Amino acid sequence: MGQVRRAFADLDEGQVHYWTSRTPVENSVPVVVLHPGPGTARIQVPLLEHLSETRTVIAPDLMGMGDSAAPPHPANDPPEIDYYSDAVKRFLDVLGIETFDLYGSSLGGRVAIDLAVNHPDRVRRLMLGQARILKGQNHADFATRHAPKVEPDQSGVYVQFLWSRLRDLYTYFPWFKRNAENMRKTNLPDANLMHIAFIEQIKMATTQHLAFAAYYRYSIEDKLKQIKARSFVRGDEVLALIPDAVEWVPAMTRDPLTAPSDDVAAYAGQMVRFLDE
């Protein structure tokens, strides 16, 4: 596998933390990877290592998540998804990246969709690991319960909440419906891997809700119809809305940090084959 390293880039509102190929691949179109949430680019490192064998990879922490600076967020003007996608675009400008392939999942998928629609001249190919359309009560439940605002307290109750949510993310879907019918058919990850994921949760505890509030305010149906990049999409209702999209039956069902290494390698292989078509 290739190796990746950490780096920072400067934007007007602060620094962006990102992971990138230790040895960039010459003459390759870079692959920009936008992480899901609650999570950060750290969770994508095993996937980046596989992709970096044949591609230059760049995976930023979205603003206010991981080690990236928080977005400006006056109470009367909270950031929307277009802020997060514009921040990614400005970050890539700083790196001198003009044309790129783009992968996003969940929160990162929303940001990737917005970036592809707003800058079709820059996104060569788009890969959506997950881009769920939520409606009605399902949307309301996620919007109010999935990623609430977290306030630190001196007794550490907020720390217990973050750990419990992390554990429940691996146990139930959605994590806040702790019923037998919502249980995932899988074991908890290794405790050391959960520790790594938990550290990332702590970093963004007080600002992650801003990105998720924007996520749930962002309607993607019309946006999906405007995508011009050739797209690789998980087979659901999103697939039908993107012109000429290619169905993706993913070889990996967990996040790259906790998935079996063979699954991560197979998933990366699916991505590379699509990019090479």
Image (tube, rainbow, N blue to C red):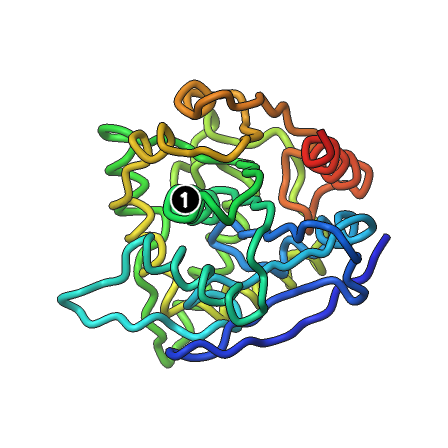
Residue type at the position of mark 1: Arg
Q: Residues within 10 Å of mark 1 (few under 14, many from 20)?
A: many
Q: Mark 1 — residue?
A: 110
Percent x, y for residue 114? Answer: 38, 46
Horizontally, is 189 left or right of 232 in the view? right
Percent x, y for residue 87? Answer: 41, 64
Identify which residue, 238 or 186, lies in the foreground.
238
Up the image or down, 121 lies above or below 97; here it is: above
Percent x, y for residue 8? Answer: 58, 76
- The answer to which quarter of the image holds residue 186 is top right
Horizontally, is 12 left or right of 91 in the view? left
Up the image or down, 115 lies above or below 25; here it is: above
Up the image or down, 14 lies above or below 121; here it is: below
**Residue shown at 41%/44% (left/top)?**
110
**Residue shown at 47%/61% (left/top)?**
62
Horizontally, is 138 left or right of 166 in the view? left
Percent x, y for residue 270? Answer: 72, 32
Identify which residue, 1 or 151, lies in the foreground.
1
Q: Secondary structure at mark 1?
A: helix
Up the image or down, 186 lies above or below 197; here it is: above
**Residue shown at 77%/62% (left/top)?**
24
**Residue shown at 53%/21% (left/top)?**
235
Identify which residue, 257 or 115, lies in the foreground.
115
- The answer to which quarter of the image holds residue 158 is bottom left
